[in-house]
Amino acid sequence: MKKHLSIAGCILAFFISFRGAAQEKLNLNMEDVDAKTNWPKGWKMGSIGRNESLDSKLRTSYRLDEKVHHAGKYSLQIDWSDTPKEWTATSYVINKSFKGKKIVLKGFVKTEDAASVGLWMRLDGEGGGDNGFDNMMDRPIKGTTDWKEYAIELDYDGEVVSKIVVGGLIIGKGKMWMDDLSISIDGKDISVAPVYAKSAYPADADTAFSKGSGLGYIAAGADKITDLTNLGLIWGFMKYYHDGVKQGNYNMDAELFRVLRKVNAAANTGEANTIMERWVDGFSKQPECNNCLEKPNKEDIQLQPDYSTLFTEGNLPASLVAKLDYIKANRTKGEKQYYNAPAAGVGNPGFAHEKKYDDSPYPDAGTRLLALFRYWNMVQYYFPYRHLIGENWNNVLPESIPDFVNAKDELEYQRACLKLIARIHDTHANLWDGADALVKSAGAKLPPFQAKFIEGKLVVVDYYADTLNIKSLVKPGDIIEKIDGVPVQELLTKHLPLAAASNYATQLRDICSYRGWLLRSDKDKAELAISRGGIATNITVPRVTAQRNFYSFESDGRHTKSFEMLHDNIGYIYPGKLQDNDLDTIKETFENTKGIIIDLRCYPSSWMTFTYPEWFTPKPTPFVKFSIGSNTMPGLFTVHDGPRVGKQSKHNYKGKIVIIVNASTQSQAEYVTMALSTAPNATVIGSTTAGADGNVSEISLPGGLSTMFSGIGIQYPDGTETQRKGVKINKVVEPTIQGIKEGRDELMEAALKIIKS
């Protein structure tokens, strides 16, 4: 739901693994070139996609230009003319913090036939997180332009910002040249800006286990799983409730590894419990506090803390339970703590000081167990949708321990992580970076056609590429019954546990996408059993290497233009291509139309949550409430009123508004749908949306893995939550197999019918 989150999120996901050392000499002018690669040192290139290496053809789109430059010897050129539906970006990372309140990026840009170009800058916190972002997409550079200097200015806080990332960006086709970048902090060039000395924490000085636990084996019998479960519960509770930990006095990874060794060697549960109680005794004693309990209004409570079996009678020794209860009762208040600094102005968790242990993609057994404990407790205490997971999250911890401690290689470990992530049922949550073995196991090739589940069947709907005679082999509307001899339903059963998504519709969306598991393989050909017109046949189709530009073919709707006038005086808006400055033209063009169709089967490229409702909704109207967690009492979530949309005006739009949604409507698109629905003449049609809304919180897991989850809860003013179930729909309309055969967009037809009626 953030501004330009579609591009920001993708840039974040692609570049999050770039871990360059802090540069002594910055290379913002791109003049320091690696002689072997002929590429400016410190710069990275990339486009939308996940864990896929840049192929040689893609690399040719980026080069140093010795002939066209603003100053010096070179400029950095991006030629993106052959992939008009993609975006691409370059990045440069500065791993330092500085004193100051304002940061300004300046740079010279030249363009040729560009759809949308800009500089971009993102400020990352210690645990990731967007502490400031701008990609100029509200003021893009378009067409053919000569050298001109552009600037981006953001608020800056050296205490929370640990990394500055800058670069150039193209959305759609075109060329851009970038040269002479500079960064200043409060008017001082970054090369002479004072470095910010961050608070020194005792936890940072505890480096005894900087490479991992050193434990190669952990017992995972029934009794030991009980001990390890209790250890995970106590460790997570201490991490988020103990004042000394909150203040940064303890490195909780190292603390876990120390006590884990002893628990692993314990002869029985009684001995393990004694070890854990002595471990708790080793933390500083909190002073008594008579006013530490958080007391929100009962009607504002969305979710109470859940301590699993920590305080269940008979599970742990009474003396240990009493000590944990004392810590809970005498915790101090505070918005921030060492392991969680919530995003300013939003409140979603900012998980800080979480070591990535990225020296090896296959961590040792103790570090793998840390991955489970870390993620499980983050969900337990900071996931606003814990109550919507669909199963008892408390059972997931003991059930998952064998998967993590027994994982015999990199692939099994990554599968264990994704299986765990998938169990929270959040489309924002996946393995977004670092899972190379898992991605490779899916295969690099797939047939060059699109398939989707229609009426419960896997149906060919379109083509990624007109290649290898594919259009003569399969036709839109063909039903795929088997793939390489295996029934589609059997493949679904196999792959669904790793399909991380909020609901079944979105799982199906992802599992048969070009990045999904269903159609990918390393085989050059696919043996398909298909049904066409009721006649079954077996065919062999070629597979091609999956390409990033396949992504752009998977959007639904009429996405050739951002807006256009249809027949019968009906307007059409496709937010996936909108720019912020399109609104004035749209108002003028569509003012007297019968109605407007807003096709949100895409991710908005414009921040339209408040601007369009000002035109559509005749008075300020509530459209959302937020559920936000607590650092004083982790696990508690309270509901807060959100902003209003709409405006009292004589010039509000009077025609009908139809909003089209489906499983491609996700996150900001769902938030926008909620806002647009406040218009008195609005109708939402379509099918279940992705059910993942709220600003995302980034999570690092051992082995260099990166994931996220929805960090704040989103609900309608009446309390209806959008997570998992998606937005409210007035009329359910879904495509049919017959409609696919006939090349019809049945949702568009339904929208036109509503406006004409």
Image: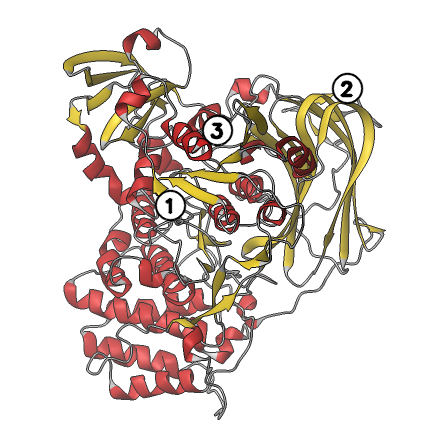
Tell me where residue 37 appears, x and y as whole percent. 63, 24
Residue 484 badge: none
Q: Is residue 108 above or below residue 327?
A: above
Q: Secondary structure at mark 1?
A: loop
Q: Is residue 561 visible?
A: no
Amino acid type indicated by mark 1: Asn
Amino acid type indicated by mark 2: Glu
Q: Is residue 331 above or below residue 252?
A: below
Left or right: residue 188 compared with residue 426 = right
Tell me where residue 606 appears, x and y as whole percent. 60, 40
Decide which of tag 2 and tag 1 comes sooner along the chain.
Answer: 2
Q: CA distance from mark 2 to mark 3?
A: 26 Å
Amino acid type indicated by mark 3: Ser
Q: CA distance from mark 2 to mark 1?
A: 58 Å
Q: CA distance from mark 3 to mark 1?
A: 43 Å
Q: Which residue is mark 1?
A: 730
Q: Secondary structure at mark 3?
A: loop
Decide which of tag 2 and tag 3 comes sooner along the chain.
Answer: 3
Left or right: residue 323 compared with residue 103 = left
Q: Which residue is mark 2?
A: 66
Q: Secondary structure at mark 2?
A: loop
Q: Residue at x 60, y 58 (%)?
A: 620
Q: Is residue 205 above or below residue 596?
A: below
Which residue is farthest front? 757
Q: Tell me the mark number nearer the camera, choosing from 2 and 1.
A: 1
State the colouring used for the structure image. secondary structure
Q: Which residue is mark 3?
A: 53
Q: Using a 10 Å C-alpha cutoff, classify the residue at mark 1 as few (fewer than 14 neighbours), some (14 to 19) or many (20 or more).
A: few
